[in-house]
Image (tube, rainbow, N blue to C red):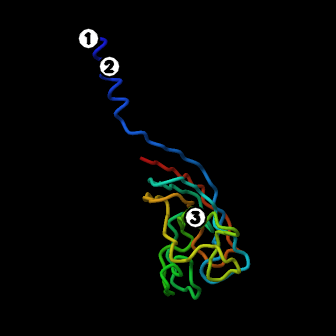
Amino acid sequence: MKTRLGLTMLVLIVAMPAVTAFAQHVYVPGKATGCFGSWDAGCKPLVTALTVSGAGTITVRANGKVDGTGPNGRKACWLTYQKPLQEAKGITDACINNWYALLGVFVPQSWVQRDGFQPVDATKNLVLVSVKPGGLFFVGEHKKFQVKEAGTLFLGINDEVARDNSGGFHVNVAFTAP
């Protein structure tokens, strides 16, 4: 009986698919806007959060404050400048719900590995290999999403005037591959 049970356990263990998982912590300072939105001389590149070697699921959890606001951002209606997530959609609205929110962009490995790549706005900087605004997405306090290929997740702040920002977000990023 003991031999049969041991053999059954061995078969179950071998039959389970291998799963690759890892996690890390990064800090995203309030000035890390990637120079998206209306250009500001105080902006800094987006923060490299995680590089993955293939398809899988990325989970992001964030806390902290930028100018007194948490990762989900806040509503503002007196704005005259384009924020990064608005630029991603090609719009300028009088009101937004995610000012100072945590944002992200996943860039394929083939693009990140090109000579001269920098995680900044490709439309405003003299950097030929950089990030297109249309790839930006809202992350907030929690985001879980699938990636289909190897690449790098970059994180930043949804604000265009970075020079006066204080604080930042503490972010845990996890990856699970099938």
Q: Residues within 10 Å of mark 1 (few under 14, many from 20)?
A: few
**The one of 87 and 19 positioned closer to us in this rendering:** 19
Q: Amino acid at mark 2?
A: Leu
Q: Position of residue 131 (x, y in %)?
A: 59, 73
The residue positioned 46% from the left and 48% from the top of the image is: 176
Quadrant of the snapshot with the N terminus: top left
Q: Is residue 142 left or right of residue 50?
A: left
Q: Is residue 79 left or right of residue 16?
A: right
**The one of 11 and 2 positioned closer to us in this rendering:** 11
Report how far apart the C-alphas of labels 1 and 2 lie in the structure.
10 Å
The quadrant holding residue 44 is bottom right
Mark 3 or mark 1, earlier in chain: 1
Q: Which residue is mark 2?
A: 7
Mark 1 or mark 2, earlier in chain: 1
State if disc 2 and disc 1 touch (CB < 8 Å).
no
Q: Position of residue 71 (x, y in %)?
A: 53, 63
Q: Residues within 10 Å of mark 2 (few under 14, many from 20)?
A: few
Question: How many numbered discs?
Answer: 3
Report how far apart the C-alphas of labels 2 and 3 lie in the structure.
45 Å
Q: Position of residue 28 (x, y in %)?
A: 63, 61
Mark 2 secondary-structure assignment? helix
**The one of 111 and 24 positioned closer to us in this rendering:** 111
Mark 3 secondary-structure assignment? helix
Mark 2 or mark 3, earlier in chain: 2
Mark 1 secondary-structure assignment? loop
Q: Which residue is mark 1?
A: 1
Q: Which residue is mark 3?
A: 110
Q: Position of residue 55 (x, y in %)?
A: 46, 55
In this view, 95 is above or below 115: below
The residue positioned 73% from the left and 79% from the top of the image is: 41
The residue positioned 55% from the left and 52% from the top of the image is: 172
